[in-house]
């Protein structure tokens, strides 16, 4: 191993679905420094209007290590860990400044907007609200949680503005 690999740095871990907290607790019990950025969002359950904490990057968290073989093995053996994120030459480190920026962002308490769930042209279906059942094509984000959906009718397009939480990506087998 090169001396670069044995420098302590932050690395990204891919976890099993919804195992981020389990992995974080497991790593901390093993005395590893772990960081799981969380944000507050409105619960999607119709019967509740609670604000809940969810991972900023579902399925991922950060761990600080120098990647020496025993530590590497101990991290990967933690319940819920799938793998380190990297390429053919091994796990890729994350800049210290990136982690510090993420910590500042999640501590700020303001709304954090992450990568787009939909890209232009995606087939989507409206699952809640007055337009439930509409199948259309994603056009663009409008801000404040709103999206534009085009519906093809009689060779012409009609567009509606809907809440981003009320639409889901249409599975490929149905589109």
Image (tube, rainbow, N blue to C red):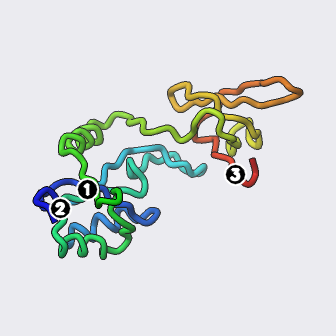
**Circles 3, 2 touching at the beta carbon (< 8 Å):** no
Q: Is residue 108 left or right of residue 18?
A: left
Q: Position of residue 116 (x, y in %)?
A: 50, 38
Residue at the extreme right:
154
Q: Which residue does the numbered mark 2 point to in the structure image? A: 65
Q: Which residue does the numbered mark 1 point to in the structure image? A: 11
Looking at the image, is mark 2 or mark 1 earlier in the sequence?
1
Q: Position of residue 171 (x, y in %)?
A: 68, 52
Q: Which residue does the numbered mark 3 point to in the structure image? A: 172
Q: Give me the residue at 43% from left, 66% from top.
A: 16
Residue closer to the observer: 92 or 55: 92
Q: Is residue 60 left or right of residue 132?
A: left
Q: Quadrant of residue 89?
A: bottom left
Q: Give me the residue at 46% from left, 63% from top.
A: 17
Residue at mark 1 to residue at mark 3: CA–CA distance = 33 Å
Q: Secondary structure at mark 3?
A: loop
133 in relation to 91, above or below: above
**Circles 2, 1 touching at the beta carbon (< 8 Å):** yes
Q: Secondary structure at mark 2?
A: strand
Q: Is residue 126 left or right of residue 50?
A: right
Residue at mark 2 to residue at mark 1: CA–CA distance = 7 Å
């Amino acid at each position: 191993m090169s001396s670069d690999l044995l420098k302590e740095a932050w690395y990204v871990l891919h976890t099993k679905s919804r195992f981020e907290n389990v992995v974080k607790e497991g790593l901390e019990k093993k005395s590893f420094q772990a960081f799981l950025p969380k944000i507050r969002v409105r619960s999607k359950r119709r019967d509740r209007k609670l604000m809940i904490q969810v991972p900023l990057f579902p399925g991922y968290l950060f761990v600080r290590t120098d990647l020496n073989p025993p530590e590497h093995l101990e991290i990967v053996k933690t319940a819920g860990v799938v793998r380190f994120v990297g390429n053919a030459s091994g796990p890729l480190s994350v800049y210290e400044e990136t982690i510090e920026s993420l910590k500042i962002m999640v501590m700020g308490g303001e709304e954090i907007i992450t990568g787009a769930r939909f890209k232009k042209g995606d087939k989507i279906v409206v699952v809640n609200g007055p337009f439930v059942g509409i199948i259309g094509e994603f056009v663009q984000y409008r801000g404040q949680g709103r999206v534009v959906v085009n519906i093809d009718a009689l060779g012409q397009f009609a567009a509606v503005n809907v809440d981003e939480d009320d639409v889901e990506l249409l599975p490929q087998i149905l589109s």
